Image (cartoon, rainbow, N blue to C red):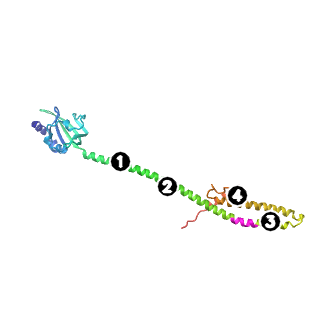
């Protein structure tokens, strides 16, 4: 075995001395390690001499992994002295010597890289989860914003209707006083005309009847306005419960009010 080790070191001397990789030289016939450099012992956390004569299959955790052919192998799990896997990239080269065929296995430790990859994967997973949570929170915030805007619109509409109700009620109140006075005056005139002869009352009676009808019509409309203003908050729009012609006029009036630009308080 010492002779084979010497031959292996002569053949692979430059690789043993200059490479930072762990190097194992294996007899291809017996598949046993005949030589190894210092980095091989460091990689597997054992003494280099304890590796000499070991069957290569004992070091490879994946029993069905064939490493006999020359080439490059990714993510090979070797067995460390503590039994835990040591992941490496393995390059296998074949050399024919006078004493037999040898295989040089150069192993580069990738455990640190695998650990970094696991950490990056964990961070990526956490970032993805946080992003999903952020999207859900953003969606909830958007929904809450839409609900708040809808409530604000409802509040503004109710306030507008209440204001319109107060405005209409005020107009109706101011109309009601002169209309009431007019109705009272007509009743007094009718009483006075009752004492006149029939030949003097004909045309005047007809005029009083006409004026009385117009007065009652005004009183009816004013009463309808007052009634509508009391339920302004529940009404679907201006003019509900009003006579059609009055509703149309009130709607036109409200539209004019909406077109008036508001003054900036500042």
Work out whether mark 3 precedes mark 4 in sequence or the reverse, and give the earlier one: 3
Q: Is residue 182 above or below residue 98?
A: below
Q: Say which label, 3 or 1, has the lower sequence index.
A: 1
Query: Residue 117's x, y, as percent?
Result: 30, 46
Q: In the image, residue 106 lies at what x, y percent?
A: 20, 40
Nearest to the observer: residue 26 or residue 53: 53
Is tag 2's residue or tag 3's residue first in the polypeptide sequence?
2
The alpha-carbon separation of the residues under discs 1 and 4 comes to 68 Å
Q: What residue sits 73% from the left and 59% below the top? A: 220
- Left or right, 191 with respect to 147, comes to right
User: What element does badge 1 sit on?
Assistant: helix
For discs 3 and 1, the disc positioned in front in the rendered view: 3
Which residue position holds label 2? Answer: 145
In this orientation, which residue lies closer to the viewer: 90 or 215?
215
The circle on residue 187 is 3
Percent across and percent down for residue 2 are 9, 37
Distance Cα–Cα, label 2 vs label 4: 39 Å
Q: Secondary structure at mark 3?
A: helix
Residue behind mark 4: 246
The C terminus - image quarter: bottom right
Residue 192 in the figure: left or right of residue 91: right
């Amino acid at each position: 075995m010492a002779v084979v080790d010497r031959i292996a070191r002569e053949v692979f001397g430059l690789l043993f001395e200059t490479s930072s990789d762990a190097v194992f030289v294996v007899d291809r016939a017996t598949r046993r390690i005949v030589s190894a450099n210092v980095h091989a012992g460091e990689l597997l956390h054992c003494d280099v001499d304890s590796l000499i004569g070991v069957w290569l299959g004992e070091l490879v955790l994946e029993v069905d992994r064939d490493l006999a052919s020359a080439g490059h192998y990714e993510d090979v799990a070797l067995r460390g002295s503590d039994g835990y896997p040591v992941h490496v990239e393995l390059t296998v080269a074949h050399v024919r010597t006078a004493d037999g065929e040898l295989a040089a296995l150069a192993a580069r430790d990738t455990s640190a890289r695998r650990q970094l990859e696991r950490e990056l994967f964990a961070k990526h997973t956490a970032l993805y989860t946080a992003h999903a949570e952020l999207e859900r929170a953003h969606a909830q915030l958007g929904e809450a914003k839409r609900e708040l805007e809808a409530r604000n619109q409802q509040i503004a509409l109710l306030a507008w209707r209440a204001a319109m109700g107060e405005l209409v009620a005020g107009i109706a109140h101011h109309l009601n006083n002169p209309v009431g006075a007019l109705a009272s005056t007509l009743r007094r005139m009718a009483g006075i005309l009752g004492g006149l002869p029939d030949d003097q009352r004909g045309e005047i009676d007809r005029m009083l009847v006409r004026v009385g009808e117009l007065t009652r019509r005004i009183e009816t409309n004013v009463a309808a306005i007052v009634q509508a203003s009391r339920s302004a908050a529940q009404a679907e729009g201006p003019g509900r419960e009003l006579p059609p012609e009055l509703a149309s006029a009130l709607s036109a009036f409200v539209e004019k009010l909406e077109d008036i630009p508001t003054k900036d308080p500042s």
